[in-house]
């Protein structure tokens, strides 16, 4: 993800290296925040807070853990804190659907519904289950990386993922039966 030399230069006080480092990770940080919070404004706020924390704490990073898991822990903790502080709200986002020629409009509509239903189902998961699902399936983290990022035992990560998959299966059972959302 990021060159170790760049990290070391940033840690040693090289301002240009630090700025370059933050620019390289900002998209990843935002994407993670968005997947967890599912709200653009909250994700931007969380990503900014995470980048500031990374900026101020870069000197405390030790190469015991991978840099991406260190970053992930910061982002995830900020998102979980933000999630705990906020009251549940319903986000109504407008999405422009663009249909290209020669595409099956029905499949496009069904795919859009499926994506929205999956996202809604993930949002209904408890925060600790949501975090492991986001890291595993949307950020493609290994079980060990998730454990490092969330500071959890490996077996707890596996247990959370198992329970989250069960919950998602229950929440999405209409799709498993071939049904559609109405």
Image: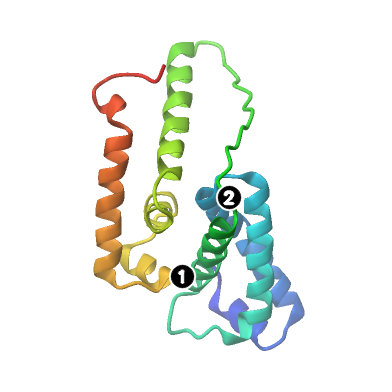
Q: In the image shown, does 90 or 105 lie closer to the viewer?
A: 90
Q: How far apart are marks 2 and 1 (CA)?
A: 28 Å
> Which residue occupies 29% across, 55% down?
161
Q: Residue furthest bottom?
A: 12
Q: Is residue 31 above or below residue 90?
A: below
Q: In which quarter of the image is the C terminus?
A: top left
Picture coordinates of residue 95, whole percent (x, y): 62, 27
Q: In this view, does 124 lie above or below 143?
A: above
Q: Residue furthest front?
A: 87
The structure's colour scheme is rainbow
**Residue highlighted by disc 2:** 87
- Lower sequence index among marks 2 and 1: 1
**Secondary element type, mark 2:** loop
> Which residue occupies 64% across, 51% down?
42
Query: Which marked residue is nearer to the observer: mark 2 or mark 1?
Result: 2
Picture coordinates of residue 170, whole percent (x, y): 27, 37
Q: In the image shown, does 11 or 156 lie closer to the viewer?
A: 156
Q: Residues within 10 Å of mark 2 (few under 14, many from 20)?
A: few
Q: Residues within 10 Å of mark 1 (few under 14, many from 20)?
A: some
> Which residue occupies 55% across, 83% down?
61
Picture coordinates of residue 175, whole percent (x, y): 30, 26
Position of 138 with respect to 11 (left or right) is left
> Which residue occupies 28% across, 70% down?
154
Q: In the image shown, does 15 or 125 lie closer to the viewer?
A: 125
Picture coordinates of residue 6, whole percent (x, y): 62, 77
**Residue highlighted by disc 1:** 69
- Residue 162: mark: none
**Secondary element type, mark 1:** helix
Q: In the image shown, does 8 or 42 lie closer to the viewer?
A: 42
Q: Quadrant of residue 14?
A: bottom right
Q: In this view, does 16 lie above or below 124?
A: below
Whether label 2 touches label 1, CB < 8 Å: no
């Amino acid at each position: 993800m990021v060159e170790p030399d760049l990290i070391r230069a940033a840690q040693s006080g090289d301002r240009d290296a630090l700025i370059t480092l933050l620019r390289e990770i900002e998209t990843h940080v935002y994407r993670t925040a968005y997947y967890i919070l599912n709200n653009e404004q909250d994700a931007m706020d969380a990503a900014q807070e995470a980048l500031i924390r990374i900026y101020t704490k870069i000197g405390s990073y030790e190469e015991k853990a991978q840099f991406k898991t260190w970053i992930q822990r910061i982002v995830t903790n900020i998102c979980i804190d933000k999630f705990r502080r906020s009251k549940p709200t319903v986000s109504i986002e407008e999405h422009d659907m663009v249909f290209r020629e020669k595409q099956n409009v029905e499949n496009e509509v069904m795919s859009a519904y499926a994506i929205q239903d999956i996202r809604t189902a993930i949002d209904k998961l408890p925060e600790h289950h949501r975090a492991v699902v986001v890291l595993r399936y949307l950020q493609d983290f290994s079980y060990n990386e998730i454990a490092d990022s969330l500071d959890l035992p490996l077996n707890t990560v596996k247990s959370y993922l198992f329970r989250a998959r069960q919950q998602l299966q229950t929440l999405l059972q209409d799709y498993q039966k071939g049904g559609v959302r109405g």
